[in-house]
Amino acid sequence: MKWILLLSIQLLTLQSCMSQTTEQKQKKMDTEKKDNNPVYSRTDTAKVVLKEEDWKKILSPEVFYIARQKGTERPGTSKFEHSKEVGTYYCAVCGNALFKSDTKFDSGCGWPSFYEPISKGSIIYLPDNTLGMQRTEVQCGRCKSHLGHVFEDGPPPTGLRYCINGVVLDFEKAKEAEKKYKAGS
Ligand SMILES: [Zn+2]
């Protein structure tokens, strides 16, 4: 029953996705700016510990809600869900590398899904028994932001499905893929 409900929510969301205006798209782009976030770095691996009130000051309300209040974005709303671009996904809160695009797959669950993190230390696992379910929460290994959950129904070789909120992901196209793309155009 829960799945049927989820599916109908997904369909509804898909419909509203298609009528997305340019203005909304622009708004999404703006959330990628890191001007106000001093802890964001793709090279610094030192752990980041901030008080929630400080996170609130440097994160957009949307990112704060998912990352720090363990929120969940509406299924089917992430621009990354069906993206096939080659590159690396980073934590949108701190810049920590999380997933490579070649471990991404179409799970059909409504959120960007991966079968393996970029490295062992890139992610932290915690038991989550909320909402009457036994799940495993995944957090960023650098800043302990909530990313999503991992389930044991993924594809080989790991059999895992990392179901991640696209709001807390940043994507950078692989340099080589970019070169190829430019050469081909
Ligand atoms: Zn992080």
Image (spheres, rainbow, N blue to C red):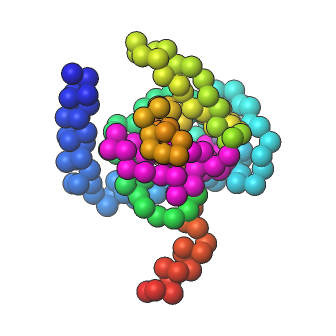
Locate the C terminus and report the quarter of the image it occupies.
Answer: bottom left
Q: Position of residue 83 (x, y in %)?
A: 41, 58
- Farthest front residue in view: 157
Q: Position of residue 123 (x, y in %)?
A: 64, 37
Find out whether residue 68 is within the magenta segment: no
Q: Nearer the viewer, residue 152 or 4?
A: 152
Q: Nearer the viewer, residue 123 or 21?
A: 123
On the rendered structure, is 117 left or right of 22?
right
Report the residue at 31% width, 61% height from top. Answer: 22
Above-or-below relation of 138 to 81 = above
On the rendered structure, is 109 left or right of 53?
left
Locate the N terminus and report the quarter of the image it occupies.
Answer: top left
In this view of the protein, can residue 174 be seen by the observer? yes
The quarter of the picture where residue 117 lies is top right
Q: Position of residue 9 (x, y in %)?
A: 23, 34
On the rendered structure, is 144 left or right of 132?
right
Residue range (magenta):
90-119
Q: Ligand 1 falls in which quarter?
A: top right
